Amino acid sequence: MQSQLENVLERNSQPAYTLMNYITALLLCAIPAFLPVLFAVIVPRLRMERRTRALLALHPGAEQTSLYLKLHSTFAWEKQREIDSKIAEMQPLGWTFLRATEANPLHTIRSWGGGLTLYFIRIRM
């Protein structure tokens, strides 16, 4: 009887899976999954903001404008093509691309591909 009780106590003393084990496993999976998002989305946005601030600091009195660009495609590479063509269309008119932000949802609600607000500055020489 005593040996059976010792066997039961010995089996029950093995470490069980606890909440800390699940949290550790979750973090070990979540951190590598977050790294591509960090380098694909956040770092380019930070670069864009730095470039914007530098251009505005360099030309404080520059004329500024913004326009809404309705995107027609749902694919990222075609959206990028639409954005690049609009920027190229504005360059001969003397506008320098500043940044792009997500447009107001009230503008994009009827658009299949969404929309962006593009910001430009014109530098007078």
Image (cartoon, helix red, strand yellow):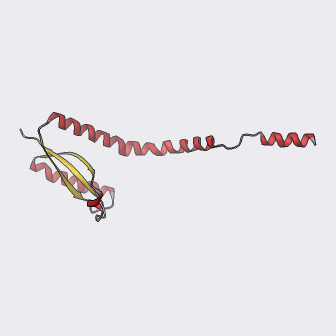
Vertically, is 89 above or below 96?
below
- In this view, which residue lies farthest toward the right? 1
Name the foreground residue: 97 vs 117.
Answer: 117
Residue 42 x/y as whole percent: 36, 43
Residue positioned 7% across, 40% down in the render? 124
| Labels in figure, total | 0
Residue 92 x/y as whole percent: 10, 50
Residue positioned 82% across, 40% down in the render? 9
Residue 67 x/y as whole percent: 18, 54
Q: Is residue 109 left or right of residue 61?
A: right
Vertically, is 106 above or below 1?
below
Residue positioned 23% across, 52% down in the render? 117
Q: Is residue 108 left or right of residue 95?
A: right
Residue positioned 20% across, 48% down in the render? 119
Quadrant of residue 69 in the image?
A: bottom left
Q: Quadrant of the C terminus?
A: top left
- In this view, which residue lies farthest toward the left? 125
Q: Is residue 109 left or right of residue 92?
A: right
Vertically, is 30 above or below 72?
above
- In this view, which residue lies farthest toward the front? 106
Residue 50 x/y as whole percent: 26, 37
Quadrant of residue 34 in the image?
A: top left
Q: Quadrant of the N terminus?
A: top right
